[in-house]
Image (spheres, rainbow, N blue to C red):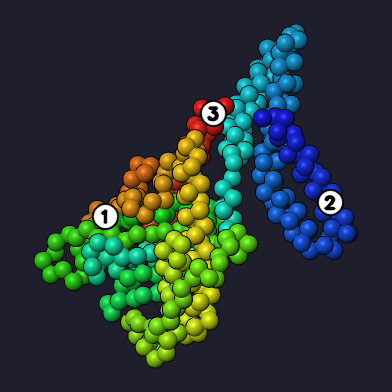
Amino acid sequence: MLEKLKAIDDRYEAINQELMDPAVIADNGKYTDLMREHKKLTPVVEKYREYRKAQESFDEAKAMLDEGGLDKDFKAIVQEQYDESREAMEKVSEELKVLLLPQDPNDDKNVIVEIRGGAGGEEAALFAHNLYRMYTMYAESKRFKCEVLNLNATELGGVKEISFMVSGEGAYSRLKFESGVHRVQRVPETETSGRIHTSTATVAVLPEVEDVEIEINPTELQIDTYRSSGAGGQHVNKTESAIRITHLPTGLVVECQDERSQFKNKDKAMKILRSRLYELKQQEQQDKIASERRLQVGTGDRSERIRTYNYPQGRCSDHRIGYTSHRLEAILNGDLDDLIDALVTADQAEKLKNSQETA
């Protein structure tokens, strides 16, 4: 591991030199790529240098203790330095193992989040809207940008289906574990007898995909136009601006009706289609490689129940990692960092375990 870290440190210094080269500064593309690599390596290099500093302190203390001849008081000071340095080395070593884990290539990408009301009728649609609000409030707290791509709303303010883009550095890394079935237990506003109902909504989180990553043959697309429908809106049912794209080889169907412009709806629909095809391609690759385990914190399968929001008890439970919080209101208001951090930690622990087993 130390040899690998030394190589990373050398590369880091080489990048620093390149970034001072006027020719590199003038080349915007190369400069941007180097800055991106520099930022990626920085936390590893800083932690490695912290380890080296602790090791130097440890070696110095060990040498003095081995040499002997120290008076009682000074020996106690050196022994304390020895113990503290050893503990620091062990702690930083574990942190470095996490930093050296293979990174998800999609982590820095923007994401497309799709939410659909599941079992529970109008109550499920209202819950889907609650989830949309939760994610947009979380995105706002992280200074991510949100853009609605497609919306199919209900008359009572619920959401049958919504697709939206979350843009910002690290958006996918923070939201990728949200895919799956979310369950809510509460008394619906429409319920007169006060009975608790259980409803569901499905969430899919897809990395935004560039044209060069997924090639789509235009001859394999069936594109239909139709009149927009939904709850309100002046352009609803007036023009055939809504777009439905069917990818014939896979049968994937994408609809977009949020914009008045047919062209804009088509552009948004193609973004969603590319991301779904990319997800499908990734799934096929993972299925072929039996040794590559999928994330223990969630397979990403939309049929998997991952979390329950229990209103009567004010409780939110993530079933994949046994996480429970009684801060339900705060979570629904976008305070997701504790929950997401727990999912990230569980994922890292599983990857460490797998790397040790295959070492």
Element type at mark 2: helix
Q: Is residue 61 above or below residue 51?
A: above
Residue at the spot x=35%, y=42% of the render? Answer: 322
Residue 134 or residue 222, whichever sits in front = 222
Q: Which residue is mark 1?
A: 310
Q: Position of residue 263 (x, y in %)?
A: 53, 81
Determine the CA span between mark 3 and mark 1: 40 Å
Residue 192 or residue 314, whichever sits in front = 192
What amino acid does circle 1 point to? Asn
What amino acid does circle 2 point to? Glu
Question: Which numbered disc covers residue 358?
Answer: 3
Question: Which numbered disc covers residue 64?
Answer: none
Determine the CA span between mark 1 and mark 2: 54 Å
Q: Position of residue 27 (x, y in %)?
A: 82, 62
Label 1: how many residues lie within 10 Å, few (<14), some (14-19) or many (20+)? some
Q: Earlier in the sequence, mark 1 or mark 2?
A: 2
Residue 152 or residue 94, whichever sits in front = 152
Residue at the spot x=59%, y=41% of the render? Answer: 102
Viewer-nearest of discs 3 and 2: 3
Element type at mark 3: helix
Whether label 3 touches label 1, CB < 8 Å? no
Q: Residue furthest right?
A: 22
Q: Which residue is mark 2?
A: 18
Viewer-nearest of discs 1 and 2: 2
